[in-house]
Amino acid sequence: MLSWQTTPLRLVDVPVPSPAPGELLVRVLACGVCRTDLHVVDGDLPVHRVSVVPGHQVVGEVVVSAGDFVVGERVGIAWLRHTCGSCRFCLRGDENLCPSSLYTGWDADGGYASYAVVPAAYALRLPSGYSSESLAPLLCAGIIGYRALKRAAVPDGGRLGIYGFGGSAHLALQVAVARGYEVHVVTRSSAARALALSLGAASASADAPPVLLDSAVLFAPVGTLVPPALEALDRGGTLAIAGIHLSDVPVLSYSRHLFQERQVRSVTANTRADAAEFLSFCSSHRLSVAVQPYPLASANLALSDLRSGRVTGAAVLIG
């Protein structure tokens, strides 16, 4: 099969992987290109395994079954692929914090390939009514955006700010609008601002929201945005930082940025419960998924376009 391996990203021909007991073998139909993949390829996140195949937003067709999945079924492979199940974090429902957790495209080969394997316990059942290309971004961009909204603690009817507007943010905005939040987007991209307004944002600006916010989510991996995002919060507001990587945060002023019970919260991966909740939401609420497709052979171009901000919505590799 063909697959892309880091060190740096290169196309190679390797054998089809053999699933271990309890694992599914899937033929990859589509794989989203995530900013986390970019961080792995660029070295911001050191790889956990040399020459790992990136990609953790994988939609595939089951070729070898396991668990209660059947051959021919369409399934999803996401970032989280293993937790111990016995540590204090797993036992209290916070498996995303498990010290023994393993991840697709970081610890194990991912979906920039023709085939992939996944433990059946971590494979995801997918909502109907979406194309494979549209489903792929839901499996990380969507799930992480959903968890970020939970971490942002938006009050009923509250004002939410979104900083950065790519694959994850354009999905989180739709969840927020469906919940009745007033959403204000801050992004430098004029195309992204137009997309945000078309999806129901109350405003879209290149610099700052026009009102004080109850909550905000920072999707852009830019630490210098943390102080202005905190300044834009009203009393008691919460800023959730959604990315796995963030450039350094400047010195904060307690009185300007944190006083009056403003708070900063990080987002670390997700639980399988988060994934199930979000995909159930996608079944009952039809999301508009902005997809920019690339053939598998153009994975480097997709990453380059994502790096330079030329992707509006989500980049997806098609096998």
Image: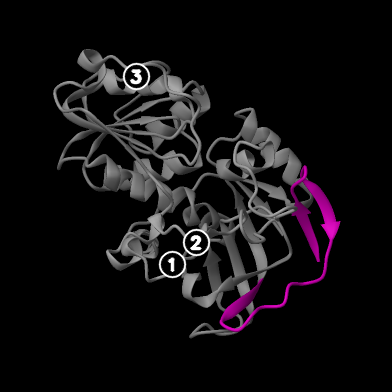
Q: Amino acid at mark 2?
A: Tyr
Compare marks 3 and 1 and give the one earlier in the sequence: 1
Q: Are marks 3 and 1 in contact (CB under 8 Å)?
A: no
Q: Residue at x 44, y 19 (%)?
A: 224
**Local secondary structure at mark 1:** loop
Q: Position of residue 31 (x, y in %)?
A: 62, 56
Q: Amino acid at mark 1?
A: Pro
Q: Is residue 228 visible?
A: yes
- Circles 3 and 2 in contact, beta carbons < 8 Å: no
Measured from the top left, where is residue 126 in percent x and y?
47, 68
User: Pointer 1: residues within 10 angstroms few (<14), some, or many (20+)?
Assistant: some
Where does label 1 land, which residue?
127
Disc 2: which residue = 130
Q: Is residue 288 visible?
A: no
Q: Which residues are magenta?
A: 1-26
Q: Is residue 195 left or right of residue 45?
A: left
Q: Which residue sits furthest right?
A: 13
Quadrant in which the C terminus appears: bottom right
Q: Earlier in the sequence, mark 3 or mark 2?
A: 2
Q: Is residue 15 left or right of residue 166?
A: right
Q: Are marks 1 and 2 in contact (CB under 8 Å)?
A: yes
Residue at image mark 3: 227
User: Percent x, y for residue 128?
Assistant: 45, 68
- Where, quadrant-wise, is the N terminus in this rendering? bottom right
Frontmost of labels 3 and 2 is 3
Secondary element under disc 3, as helix, strand or loop, is helix
Q: Is residue 19 magenta?
A: yes
Camera-nearest residue between 33 and 79:
79
In whole angstroms, how far apart are the C-alphas of marks 3 and 1?
38 Å
